[in-house]
Amino acid sequence: MYDIYGIGNAIVDVDITVADDFLQSQELPKGQMTLVDSQQINSLVEMLGDRPMNRKSGGSAANTIFAATGFGLTTGYACRLGDDVNGNYFFNEMSEANIQTSAIDTQSNESSGQCLVMITDDAQRTMCTDLGISSNVTMSEVDQDGLSRAKVLYIEGYLSSSPVSSASAIKCHEIAREKGIQTAITLSDVAMVSFFRDSMTSIIGNGVDTLFCNAEEALSWAQTDRLDIAINELKDIAPELYITLGSDGAQVVTSNGSTNIPGIPVKAIDTNGAGDIYAGACLAARRQGANPQDAARFANHAAAHLIQLFGARLASVQAYADLKTSYNG
């Protein structure tokens, strides 16, 4: 039985540092994710020359599931992987972490998903993503028996960009509702909110139990420049709401009111994956008995630790366990 079962795009991240001028020259919106094809990624890599690159399995929900596993939960993950270097790299890394993951699709010639993560001096990450085969997650990839016995279903908002994956996310949400399983979703990226709002609305359906987003995503969802208005609208979607505010911490909203959880002052090197580890830490803490405010404090601690390092994940599952052990909150 899974504590959390996630569904999302399986992506292998390639991290590289760049200057703002490079993003401007390529007309890439800083701090956002842009969908591209493999040829465009290869072209960007070629232009960047021999700069050091770091490869790591990624994907928003996968990062969250990986973190939750390290923080002590039993997890599973539905995705679609191609039979190639990136697909095998991703599958092996998840398997080594004892995360039950969808099998590699050996019948397809499509490539696995990849993401070029360009990090600027201010620690902002700008992503170019080639979803490849990962953009079409079908119900064949879902462990429906495992999902039916899970405690929490976790859905990433990036699935809204694909009609096939959206349909699977909607079906998983329906199964969860039928079985009385809690549901959590992340809005994932302001571009998803802006361009795939109808699809994301369909995935959310009549609402979820928990919603994660950052302030920019919240404002975009409510189409306002006032966070209080955005909060009032998002409260209708989820009774438990976590809005991350960067260095200012997070806003936790429940039926008992709204609480600001202060940020932890650190020198940020790379913010890639901060929201993902935040969600994983928060979900793990809630499953282990913490109240929403204490869960958010632990999540702040986890995210603050991650952004002092390069990459969207810590080095290993054990690194997450060690981080939890060292927490004095």
Image (cartoon, helix red, strand yellow):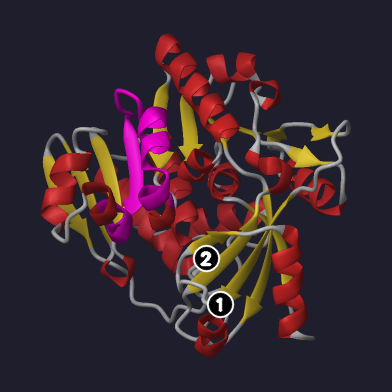
Numbered range of the magenta stretch: 192-218
- Look at the picture and state if 126 lies above or below 260: below
Q: Residues within 10 Å of mark 2 (few under 14, many from 20)?
A: many
Which residue is the extreme one toward the top? Answer: 178
Q: Which residue is mark 2?
A: 272
Q: Residues within 10 Å of mark 1 (few under 14, many from 20)?
A: many
- Look at the picture and state if 252 lies above or below 42: above
Closest to the observer, 318 or 57: 57
Which label number is shown at residue 119?
Answer: 1
- Look at the picture and state if 189 lies above or below 78: below
198 falls in the magenta region: yes
Residues marked 2 and 1 touching at CB (< 8 Å): yes
**Residue type beneath disc 2:** Asn
Left or right: residue 292 versus residue 64 is left
The residue shown at (69%, 26%) is 141
Q: Quadrant of the rendered structure where residue 214 is?
A: bottom left
167 falls in the magenta region: no
Q: Is residue 3 visible?
A: no
Callout 2: helix, strand or loop?
loop
- Of callouts 2 and 1, which one flags the residue occurring earlier in the amino acid sequence? 1
